[in-house]
Image: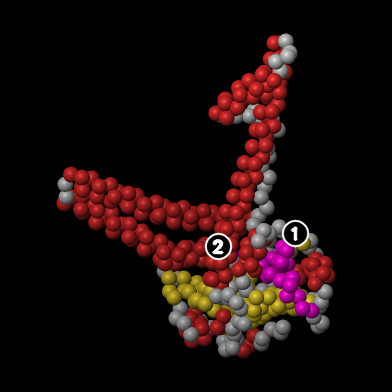
Amino acid sequence: MEVRFAVKSMYDEAMFYHQLVASMPKKQEVEKPRFLLPPLGYQELVLLPVMLFVFYSVFRDLPWPERAVQSAAAAFLAWGILKLNRKRQKQAKEKKAEETDEKAQLKAQARALLSNSLLDGDRCSLEFYDEGFQFENSGITTWYEYEGVAWLKETPKYVLIFWNRSMSLPVEKAGIHRGNAVQFPAFLEKRCGKRIERVRVEE
Amino acid sequence: MEQLKEQDARFIVHHEVTEDKLLHLEKGVRIIGFQSRGRRVVTALCLLSVFTFILAYVSDSVLRIVSAAIGLVSLLLAVCCLYSFFREWHYAKKEIKRQFANLAGREKACWEYRFYDQCYEVVGLHELSHVKYSYIGRVLNLSGMLVLVEKGNVVRYFMQKDLTKGDGEGLRQFLEKKCKRPVETVRV
């Protein structure tokens, strides 16, 4: 049997972190309501009258009914733009905080898994043949057939072969020392009969 | 990679994954987790509440009220810890049953474990492993279920009655000798 691809990796925090991120179920997008009345807070109660007064003062040359209508329209428009901008900034800030918090939790989980695995710093290797692939480290040698692969995922650093829900084999892209690394994902897709799902990982 | 000769195996286990085995394993893992951490916390809280209730009984005025309050809070926290433990166990059981209901009609997952002098072999549907005994981190006996915890967070489990060659006691002694560590017994 000819080795088509050979990979060497090391167990480290990044390996477990990428596996954790790739194992997470997809976040379901929350359906935003199409139309929602803006809530009235203390900012609205203060800002709106101030803007109304400012525009009323600016349009002093107009007759008073027209002046009232135009200043009201301008004030509402200006207030609306400011509010939208503030809302976007707030949402971006909240999303960033949530992602940072989630990332920190996953990194902590990865560190714990690495520590419990007793494999920190150990090396492992994978060899891919046409019929299957072999995994080896200091204590175990396993032969896998492509038919048993459940699904495939790819992160910026690893291609992850999921054997079942709770076990995945990470293939470090930088560790491919035999075969063309660029052709590896396509080879795997063809052998396993599965499409590789790309997963975004923030380091 | 070639399979080793079956006749050379000292012990052979034919293991089929069933709902009962998963529930048994889950219960055992939770008991171990509780024994290692939760039990200390609950015991400490119970002792604190007993001590503060006694203090409340023997003292008077402000100290009595404060001690009684601390005792009550400690007791409530201990009850909360126990409630949380049983609730998580209930949800885990429900999840296992749900997963098995989804798999109904499909072929059951099964493995064969063959124990040789130099290593043990794991034969699955699309996989074959040779594992050195030094790769095992822990060996547990959960009331008739043997659990091998390998490095890399891999857990292999089977019931002693699944043995098709050899006996459970002999396997336990064999594993103690090969892994150079005692088998931890946990009552489930």
Residue B124 is at least partly visible in this image? yes
Residue under the image location 67 percent in, 18 percent down = A56
Tell which of A174 and B71 is nearer to you. Answer: A174
CB of mark 2 within 8 Å of CB of mark 1? no
Q: Which residues fall within the magenta stretch?
A: A155-178
What is the quadrant of residue A151 in the picture? bottom right
Badge 1 element: strand
**Quarter of the image where the N terminus of chain A is located:** bottom right
Q: Label 2 sits on what residue type? A: Ala
Badge 2 element: helix
Q: Position of residue A30 (x, y in %)?
A: 66, 42
Tell which of A27 and A192 is nearer to you. Answer: A27
Q: Is residue B171 left or right of residue B17?
A: left
Residue B24 is at least partly visible in this image? no
Q: Label 1 sits on what residue type? A: Arg
Could you tell me what secondary structure mostly forms the magenta stretch?
Answer: strand
Q: From what the image shows, is residue B147 above or below residue A166?
A: below
Tell which of B64 and B167 is nearer to you. Answer: B64
Q: Position of residue B6 (x, y in %)?
A: 64, 85
Q: From what the image shows, is residue B180 above or below residue A196?
A: below
Q: From what the image shows, is residue A21 above or below residue B129?
A: above
What is the quadrant of residue B123 in the picture? bottom right
Q: Any magenta on residue B22? A: no
Q: Which residue is mark 1?
A: A198
